[in-house]
Amino acid sequence: MKRRSFLTASAVATASLATGCSSTHDKNKTVNINKNKKVHLKLATSWPAHFPIMGTGVESFVEDVKVASGGSIDIALYPKNTLIPALQVFDACSAGHIDIFHSGPYYWKGKNSAFSLFSGAPFGFTAEEINTWMLYGGGYELWRELYGKFNLHPFMGGNTNVQMGGWFRKEINSVADLQGLKMRVPGLGGDVFAKLGVNPILLPAGEIYSSLERSTIDATEWVGPALDLRMGFYKVAPHYYSGWHEPGSILELTFNKTKWNGLSAEHQAILEMASSKMNNYMAFEFSNENANALLKLKELGIETKNFPKDVILAAKQGLKDVVAEHSAENEDFKRVWESATLHLDKAKELSKIGLGNYLKTRDGV
């Protein structure tokens, strides 16, 4: 998104909220917008009702839109499987069966491998870095261009921050221990794990614990300590590893493009600002809740481990192989990867000199 367009939209909505009227101004004319026309939208998610952080974040978004619009935007919220199955929201929104969905771009890499890059990549962007790429490095333009082919218009809708590497039924001491493991892991991370001998499997949230318990799968990554603790994975897969596969994963709030284009400028601005609030608040809530949950996991005797060095080295080589393969097969992937890499190379220098050195100094290393 261009900064100017965001500020223009923000100004429109701020003016209308402050004065109770609906108009935009230039030097020569005033254009009135019919705020009183009520808009009904259907929003489906990939999360259960009241699911912590992700689900409750969307619930807050719906309420924010209702308040900011004075009730002129009415959003009916459908948690996963109440209207649309969890992993069918993309197709349903594309076809116009729903107007909005909340999910993760990496779930749709089967439609276009480039889509997974809009969530992030192994050893790639932190949450701050990927937000910056989206807003100022061309990420939004590429995302909307490619989603537009499916009649979709996406916004950032949250960020999980650094995710954990996963829960394993057995300890991982080398790459050899990964051979043949069945692991729930989506996106590019799944592709890289496959290079290490893992069989990646895509499962919705509600099926992960039972699959681990019945040994249908051997391992799972999910998100981070807060949601992992609530899912109870430590009871059936006690070996917990730090992560590298999703260092700052974006969640999405995506609109049917036809529906979005038919909304008034004022309503678009309200929805955009509410999504921006959700994007920020969700990332901060993850940070807070993950810190709290990590303490509880320690009290339960769960030790957080790091993958062995040979696993990390193999994963980095695996990422190079995966990127080369996808780039050769898909020009879209190549373009998005090149854009992301160009921005990441700049961001790395700042992060290393700034945050990286600060953390070493703060922790006394």
Image (spheres, helix red, strand yellow):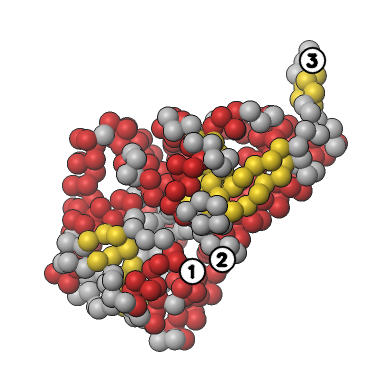
Q: Amino acid at mark 3?
A: Lys
Give the secondary structure at mark 1: helix
| Horizontal relation, residue 66 to residue 288: left or right | right
Q: How dense is the environment of label 1, judged by Cα within 10 Å: few (below 14), some, or many (20 and up)? A: some
Answer with mark 3 or mark 2, whichever residue precedes in sequence. 3
Horizontal and vertical percent position of residue 272: 63, 40
Does residue 342 appear anywhere in the picture?
no
| Residue 29 image label | 3
Q: Nearer the viewer, residue 263 or 6?
A: 263
- Of the 4 image quadrants, the one containing the C terminus is bottom left
169 or 286, nearer to the observer: 169
Q: CA distance from mark 3 to mark 1?
A: 52 Å
Question: Does label 2 or label 1 sit earlier along the sequence?
Answer: 2
Residues at circles 2 and 1 in contact by the CB criterion of under 8 Å:
yes
- Image disc number at residue 227: 1
Q: Earlier in the sequence, mark 3 or mark 1?
A: 3
108 left or right of 4 in image: left
**Disc 2 residue type (three-letter):** Pro
**Horizontal and vertical percent for residue 330?**
26, 34
